[in-house]
Image (cartoon, grey):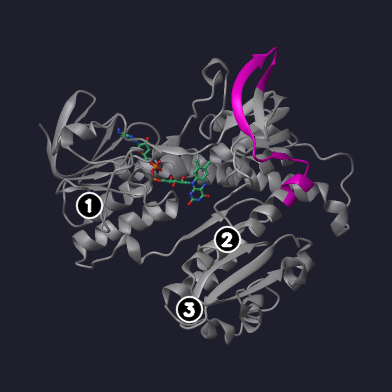
Amino acid sequence: MPNFDAIIIGAGQSGPALTRRLVAAGRKVAIIERKLFGGTCVNTGCTPTKTLIASAYAAHVARRAADYGVRIEGPVSVDMKAVKTRKDAVVAVFRDGLERSLKTLQGCTVYQGHGQFIAERKLAVNGSELGADQIFINVGARAAIPPIPGLDQVPYLTNSSMMDVDFLPSHLVILGGSYIGLEFAQAYRRFGSEVTVIELGPRVISREDEDVSQAIAGFLKEEGIDVRVDSKIVGVEKQGNLIAATIESAGRISQIAGTHILIATGRRPNTDDLGLDRAGIATDRRGYIQVDDQLRTNIAGIWAMGDCNGRGAFTHTSWNDFEIVAANLLDNDQRRVSDRITAYALYTDPPLGRAGMTEAEVRKTGKPALISTMAMKDVMRAYERGETKGFMKILVDRDSKRILGASFLGLEGDEVIHCVLDIMYAKAPYTVIQRAMHIHPTVSEFIPTMLDQLKRLQ
Ligand SMILES: Cc1cc2nc3c(=O)[nH]c(=O)nc-3n(C[C@H](O)[C@H](O)[C@H](O)COP(=O)(O)OP(=O)(O)OC[C@H]3O[C@@H](n4cnc5c(N)ncnc54)[C@H](O)[C@@H]3O)c2cc1C
């Protein structure tokens, strides 16, 4: 049985980076990948969706060209095969680069196959058994398929199979009005599909503040997306070439029939086929591996990183997990999950950049707080760019003067949010950024202005 110092299961966001660190520290490492190097982010998540969104944005701007004094003769059309080819090329750069770098890394053995525990420190892959003193699980997550009657009888798409789409669905029905569903909704609407979003909750993206949800739903509707909230899908069936979803909303039953249906109702961890019970590794009831603040599982010598530990669902949280594990193991630096501040983005256009607490969360703390908001139509840079949708909101602790959270829904919101995030990491008072001289004309120049206009949170 080949024995390693460390085995990493899954070549997602944290596994390969940790592999490189361990190898550089002189350890003999094996990494097991069952499918595509780079995992979700590179192959079916961030990279391909943001590449598709860039094509959709180009189509959108082209249609609005006249607003900028630019004439395009004839209607704007989208070549979906070319859009997919571009997306595949971008993905291939990252996936192939990673695969090559791991396979040529001295001290690292790559196994391509499904890894499973057969005992505490033993794994099986492709019929071979491997052992190691340390095992790092980085197996990610996949689309959760809800138990809707009839769903197993119709063809449906997930974020993974969407990656093979090289045609324009004439009517895309999306189940789930959260981050993944909304990004696909806007992109496909801009490609030219009719799009319906069906959301069970009372508003889209319900983890965000109500004003943020309403603003996002507003601009999606303006683009012609049919957004249905408070809508429960009670059944799905094939009707000729269409797929019909039966919806119950406020006690009334109706049907929506589309040509294609995309399931975007949440994620589930890839831990059900990992043999965790044979190693005695504890999970919660949803299958997420339970870890402590340094990402150790309940079994000594076994760690879990990335989406499968339920402590984050983003590429940057998975990467940060790698940094935490590497710092503790190799640098005698006791970094912890609880050191990090919530941060993420929604890549609609305009995007939403988020840091720290929402307004609703701040209210729940009951602490005295200050708030400032600014409409993007009052931001010169947004005006100049002709992209004035959305607003920015910052919340501050009245006593400590620390920034508690921010939601920037507007032009470059995903970038601008980092001004705030870094001040939060610095544990500095908001006055530091309030007094900073920012560059004109930018969106960020209005953050000091917003901080000049803080008011009591009522
Ligand atoms: C549509 C979509 C868009 C997204 N957009 C963003 C975004 O813009 N920004 C962002 O931060 N996050 C985004 N995410 C989330 C992000 O992709 C994930 O949080 C991130 O990829 C998780 O990385 P990971 O390291 O946990 O695992 P993954 O990247 O999922 O990698 C896990 C790897 O393990 C392999 N594996 C699983 N089981 C086994 C096994 N038993 N044996 C061997 N190999 C195995 C898998 O094949 C996979 O390659 C998006 C997700 C989706 C679905």
Q: How crowded is the residue under tag 1: few (<14 C-alpha within 10 Å), some, or many (20+)? A: some
Which one is earlier in the sequence, the residue at label 2 or at label 1? 1
**Label 1, on which residue?**
296
**Label 3, on which residue?**
402
Query: Residue 83 placed where, x, y %?
Result: 65, 37
**57 displayed left or right of 34:** right
Helix, strand or loop at mark 1: loop
- Type of the residue with mark 3: Arg
Compute the Cα span from label 3 to label 1. Answer: 31 Å
Please give the label number shown on residue 267.
none
Compute the Cα span from label 2 to label 3. Answer: 19 Å
Q: Nearer the viewer, mark 3 or mark 1?
A: 3
Above/below status of 226 relative to 438 = above
Residue 281: in magenta span = no
Residue with the most extreme top position? 240
Residue stretch in magenta: 218-244
Q: Is residue 168 visible?
A: no
Please give the label number shown on residue 353.
2
Dividing the picture into quadrants, the one containing residue 110 is top left
Dividing the picture into quadrants, the one containing residue 34 is top left
Residue closest to the eye, 82 or 43: 43
